Amino acid sequence: MKNILLLAIFINLFLEANCQDKIECYCPKSKYTNVGKPDTIVYLSSGKSIMLCGYRNRDDHPNTFSEFILSVCGSNSIIDFWDATLTCKIKTKNDTLLVERIESLPTGKNFKFLSTVWTIEKIYFVGNKAVKRLSVNREIPKYNQKEINTLLEMTIRANPIQNDSTMNFAYRLFIAAISGSKDARKDFERFKQKFRIESAEYLEEYDILQRMLLQWDNETY
């Protein structure tokens, strides 16, 4: 009789686990997205599952995501929303979900623009509560002194007429500033006046870089 009871308990536990594995995740209704089923589900060893509801940029390799939410499977609450202006990679490490914000920055050889991780958001669980922590990627490639000197000379000789090539100097001075160059920081801060930037598009780009530099300096999240 005891063996039969133990067998019944084992079968019941197996069926419950099997049913839990087959529970489907559906995106919670929200103002951010009208997607029904999640694009991606991340399973953590803690037993928690995080779903991504939004849009995959299939032209990127590996794929990135924009305009998406993250939510815990089986929950109607949203962990957070990342809007259409952001491009992010998703990965896991040590039972933590990482959301890496990607920016095109001149971090390559000869100031070449490359897809670069700017910030990293870590999402993990303390009990049943999802915790989110944001930090700037301090490992972003920096310029050495020779590259900084070359850039400063190029900036002096640059034609002060606003265009895409001119705006490249703003990005390069930004990287030189976070590399520790005080002269590059001064040139970056005077950039709008020096190059007579008046275009709304270019002013917006420059404003984003200013906020990124402030974020790098303060890292108050």
Image (cartoon, grey):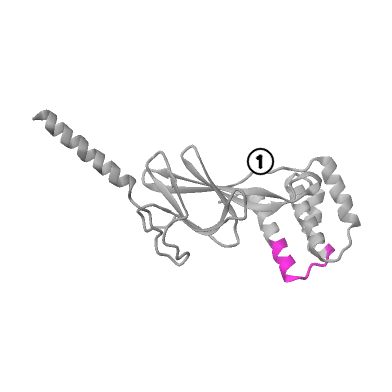
Tell me where residue 66 sits by quadrant: bottom right
Residue topped by disc 1 = 139
Closer to the camera in the image, 109 or 183: 109
> Magenta stretch: residue 21 in it?
no
Q: Residue 208 location, x and y as percent?
A: 67, 60
Tell me where residue 207 sits by quadrant: bottom right
Q: Residue 37 location, x and y as percent?
A: 42, 58
Residue furthest to the right in view is 157
Dominant secondary structure (helix, strand or loop) of the stretch shown in magenta: helix
Asked whether, in this view, residue 128 is left or right of residue 88, the answer is left
> Magenta stretch: residue 199 in it?
yes
Amino acid at dot 1: Glu
Residues rendered magenta in the picture: 194-207
Rendered position, 55 above or below 14: below
Asked whether, in this view, residue 43 is left or right of residue 188, the answer is left
Residue at 40% in and 47% down: 49
Q: Residue 7 location, x and y as percent?
A: 17, 33
